[in-house]
Image: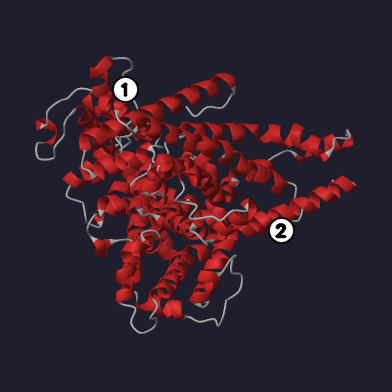
């Protein structure tokens, strides 16, 4: 036993002495404000100091270049009459033709309206829902009840989009369960709800709320549990009613969280994803259901109009990025919370 | 805090409890409906006018007998499991590496690197140019097309980076004094200390992958044998019209009515494809909760 310990000590001291022989390269030698040459000089020193880190960088940087930065460069297709046979270098340049075609095309107004409306309605109804749910849950004092409701409410989030849309299709067909309820409430016979363009927005937004409300409330429930209980005690002593406590203590306390979540949500307001709509729409409901992302999918991958669909995609991401930056700037100015 | 309840409080509490129960009921009722519909008599299910909360007619496992023989579901199952396992391995390891290097104080360009990665959240090439790159690399219709283009996500990197930054520098320094190299520090010292965060990432990846279908639609245009489960679910549930023929083709003698058969396959396959996740999530809840917290704090 003792021998082993001795040996261990020996190995350790050996290691330490080896370390002493080859001291770590010190963090000196960097130059500040020396332009590009200075940068190269610093990079060289940094590389010698952190060789292994630089090697670990390689796969990550290479992957990001291939799957994010090369596609960004691929955006030049938007200004070409792109044909795969000729490639990006061989395809003829057409300037802004693709954009002009999109802006003057028959679908521009419809796509813009649908994208904006679905995005806005989704925030208008989908954003407050988890907050209200969290506030109501916060009023419950029975721990087991609260925990159970919470767990159950997360469940829809874990069901796949395909299954959720399958259920929607099933429940809203003529004679489906939701169709029956709607028929009873409105007193008319109801055909397939999903086939009627008038209903698409409501179905889309309500099912989003169903799927996301419980999960979305996690962050607010956490924020609520962090509210100082002494505030409530003081308010009770001052005779504040339950409603007043909610308005003057609870909501102001979680306001920073609400603001951050709102900026996040506003930033992606016009980025209405294609996957759910592709599962739910049919040519009969394009009038209200077709959005920019689904249009890109159809033009690019079904009609192989690469240049045109890239142009539409570029338009979409420019609007999206502008929106994010503007919301962030506004929020920075008027509240204390911002993303960057 | 002892507060005397007024009558108003009693009314509010009662209504609130009832309302929350209603919400919880609405959250689970579609799944309960599906479960019971799958063991009911299909003719009665098609006629049912409200949610099925108990088996209609004589309960039977016919749906599951059919699904056992329904090859596509099992091809999909196998593929999805392959994708989930492979994606968890690839993405979690790369996220740890990226989180580690972007949090090293000794690495002068860590913030520049982080900016380089985070910029992709702000602006991206879009669906078509990314598709063209995947196509050019010859990945279309290969399993790699579902794995490599999603190998990393800034979200996971940020979560990992935040966890690693919380570990005191002294640990790394003392390990370095003992002669530990970069890889030893990362995998033997840093990683064990953020096991919980690592678990969170793996859970997020696994659930996301299990439920994903859109990239298969984009990148596996003709490779049906590589379809994940959700693509077959899409055929069964959404474009049912197209698949009726293939479904009934191997119906055998279990059912002679195509419509009944479709009903059973529809509900049975939802149960089979969704149950694994629904059975697991209540136990992993706390990890998801902490993941949501970190993710949203760091944006």
Q: Which residue is mark 2?
A: A145
Disc 2 residue crowd, few under 14, some 14–19, many 20+, Cα 10 Å? some
Q: Is residue A48 visible?
A: no
The front one of A222 and A177 is A177
Residue extending farthest top: A34
The answer to whether any part of residue B188 appears in the image is yes
Foreground of the two, A92 or B150: A92
Mark 1: give few (<14), some (14-19) or many (20+) Cα within 10 Å: some
**Residue behind mark 1:** A30
Q: CA distance from mark 2 to mark 1?
A: 60 Å
Circle 2 or circle 1, nearest the eye: 2
Is B23 drawn above or below residue A86 in the view shown?
below
Chain letter for mark 1, please. Answer: A
Mark nearer the N terminus (2 vs 1): 1
- Which chain is disc 2 placed on? A
Q: Is residue A91 above or below residue A55?
A: above
Mark 2 and mark 1 on one chain: yes
Mark 2 element type: helix
């Amino acid at each position: 036993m003792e021998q082993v310990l001795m040996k261990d000590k020996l190995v350790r001291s050996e290691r330490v002495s080896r370390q002493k022989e080859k001291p770590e390269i010190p963090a000196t030698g960097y130059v500040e404000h020396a332009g590009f040459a200075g940068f190269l000089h610093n990079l060289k020193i940094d590389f010698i100091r952190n060789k292994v880190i630089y090697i670990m960088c390689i796969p990550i940087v290479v992957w990001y270049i291939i799957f994010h930065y090369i596609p960004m460069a691929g955006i030049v297709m938007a200004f070409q009459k792109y044909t795969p046979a000729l490639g990006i270098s061989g395809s003829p340049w057409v300037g802004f033709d693709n954009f002009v075609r999109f802006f003057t095309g028959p679908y521009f107004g419809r796509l813009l309206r649908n994208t904006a409306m679905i995005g806005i309605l989704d925030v208008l109804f989908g954003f407050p829902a988890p907050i209200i749910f969290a506030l109501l849950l916060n009023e419950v004092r029975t721990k087991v009840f609260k925990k159970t409701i919470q767990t159950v409410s997360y469940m829809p989030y874990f069901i796949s989009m395909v299954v959720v849309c399958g259920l929607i299709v099933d429940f809203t067909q003529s004679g489906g369960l939701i169709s029956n309820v709607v028929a009873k409430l409105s007193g008319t016979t109801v055909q397939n709800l999903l086939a009627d363009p008038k209903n698409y927005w409501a179905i889309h937004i309500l099912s989003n709320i169903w799927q996301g409300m419980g999960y979305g409330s996690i962050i607010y429930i956490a924020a609520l549990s962090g509210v100082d209980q002494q505030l409530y005690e003081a308010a009770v002593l001052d005779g504040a009613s339950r409603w007043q406590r909610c308005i003057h203590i609870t909501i102001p306390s979680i306001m920073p969280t609400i603001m951050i979540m709102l900026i996040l949500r506003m930033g992606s307001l016009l980025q209405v994803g294609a996957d759910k709509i592709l599962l739910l729409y049919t040519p009969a409901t394009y009038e209200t259901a077709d959005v920019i992302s689904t249009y890109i999918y159809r033009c690019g991958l079904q009609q192989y109009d690469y240049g045109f669909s890239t142009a539409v995609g570029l338009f979409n991401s420019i609007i999206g990025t502008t929106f994010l930056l503007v919301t962030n700037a506004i929020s920075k100015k008027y509240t204390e919370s911002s993303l960057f | 805090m002892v507060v005397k309840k007024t009558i108003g409080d009693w009314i509010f509490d009662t209504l609130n409890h009832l309302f929350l129960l209603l919400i919880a009921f609405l959250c689970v009722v579609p799944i309960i409906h599906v479960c019971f519909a799958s063991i009911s008599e299909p003719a009665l299910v098609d006629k049912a006018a409200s949610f099925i909360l108990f088996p209609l007619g004589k309960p039977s496992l016919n749906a599951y007998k059919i699904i056992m023989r329904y090859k596509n579901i099992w091809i999909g199952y196998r593929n999805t499991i392959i994708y989930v396992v492979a994606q968890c391995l690839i993405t979690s390891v790369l996220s740890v590496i990226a989180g580690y290097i972007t949090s090293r104080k000794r690495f002068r360009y860590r913030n520049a690197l982080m900016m380089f990665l985070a910029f992709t959240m702000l602006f991206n090439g879009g669906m078509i140019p990314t598709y063209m790159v995947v196509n050019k690399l010859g990945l279309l219709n290969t399993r790699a097309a579902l794995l490599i283009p999603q190998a990393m996500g800034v979200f996971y990197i940020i979560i990992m980076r935040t966890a690693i930054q919380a570990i005191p520098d002294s640990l790394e320094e003392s390990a370095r004094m003992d002669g530990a190299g970069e890889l030893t520090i990362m995998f033997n010292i840093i990683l064990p200390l953020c096991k919980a965060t690592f678990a969170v990432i793996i859970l997020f990846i696994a659930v996301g992958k299990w439920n994903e279908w859109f990239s298969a639609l984009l990148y596996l245009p003709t490779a049906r044998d590589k379809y994940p489960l959700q693509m077959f679910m899409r055929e069964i549930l959404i474009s049912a019209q197209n698949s009726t023929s293939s479904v009934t083709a191997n119906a055998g003698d279990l059912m002679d009515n195509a419509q009944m058969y479709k009903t059973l396959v529809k509900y049975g396959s939802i149960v089979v494809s969704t149950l694994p996740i629904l059975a697991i999530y209540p136990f992993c809840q706390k990890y998801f909760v902490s993941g949501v917290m970190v993710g949203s704090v760091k944006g």
